Amino acid sequence: MKTSLFIPRRSFVHSLDPRTKMLAVAMSFAALLLFDEPRFLLGPALGLLAVSFAGRVFRRFLAGALLLGSFGMLTFLVWPLFLTLRGQGGPTAWIYGAGVGLRLIEILLAAFLLMLTTSNEQLLAGLGRLGIPYPMVFSLSLTSRLLPSLLATAGHVVEAQRLRGLRFDEGGLVRRARRYIPLLIPILACSLRTVHQMAWALEAKGFGADARNRVPYLELRMEARDWVVLAFSILMLAGAVWARVHGLGIIGVMHGL
């Protein structure tokens, strides 16, 4: 059962320290939030494509872009309508909607690219080394593994009911939906049993008893390439702040909201 979006590859992006990638993504988020003019967002879009090529995950990245593009399209349609109701309609409203939609897609794709090139173990180890409390890191680890497990349990319950003769593909939409409601009880029961078993296992292993002698699963070490990527990310963010301070990349239709 696959528990993450990670695609193992031998590439420059994969070889980076997870802390480097997380900090670079965080700085790209901050830079993207500074602009709403589409022209200033085309460069970051090309940058994401280049990183996907360098990480050898371009096909999966493109599939994610097509899927996440629906969120950007919805934003592109909603914002002009909202601005028209405020008396700020016209071509500028559509340009602003395109910019906000493109910005949303790029933020989602940056996070998606991080998940494609970084395993769960690397992400959690990086968060721990960045100073995130271990209980919070462990909770994120459990979440990333329990969600696929919950989906697999739901699939098993559905298949078991089909073997018993329950037809999920007959009748109207409402009738089909009502057939899934009774399945919530066995799914919930299985999930609670899994949680209880995990709690017992953690208690048996002495979780949280002494954090001073904890040995990390992965040893992380920053290389020269990591510092180069971080320096480039800092320069990128500094350039974005400079452009924003000088009034570049902003349409300004939301002033006074």
Image (tube, rainbow, N blue to C red):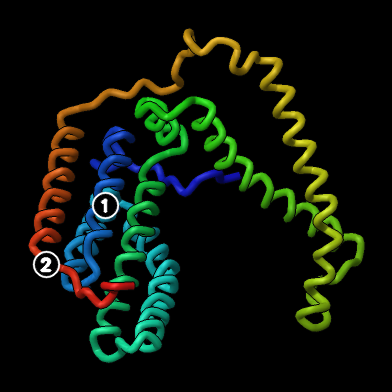
The quarter holding residue 117 reads top left
Name the element at disc 2.
loop
Q: Characterize the local packing of mark 2: few (<14), some (14-19) or many (20 or more) Cα atoms within 10 angstroms.
A: some
**Left or right: 101 in relation to 186:** left
Amino acid type of the residue tagged 2 in the rendering:
Leu
Q: Quadrant of the C terminus?
A: bottom left
Where's residue 198, x and y in %? 70, 29
Amino acid type of the residue tagged 1 in the rendering:
Ala
Name the element at disc 1.
helix
Q: For mark 2, what is the residue?
A: 248
Residue drawn at x 79%, y 48% is 188
Residue 61 visible in the displayed image: yes
Where's residue 149, x and y in %? 66, 44
Q: Is residue 214 above or below residue 198?
A: above
Q: For mark 1, what is the residue?
A: 30
**Left or right: 45 in relation to 80:** left
Residue drawn at x 83%, y 78% is 175
Residue drawn at x 83%, y 71% is 178
- Residue at the far front in the pictured view: 256
Q: Is residue 203 above or below residue 241?
A: above
Where's residue 129, x and y in %? 36, 25
Q: Quadrant of the N terminus?
A: top right
**Left or right: 109 in relation to 153:** left
Q: Characterize the local packing of mark 1: few (<14), some (14-19) or many (20 or more) Cα atoms within 10 angstroms.
A: some
Residue drawn at x 29%, y 84% is 94
Residue 205: assigned label: none
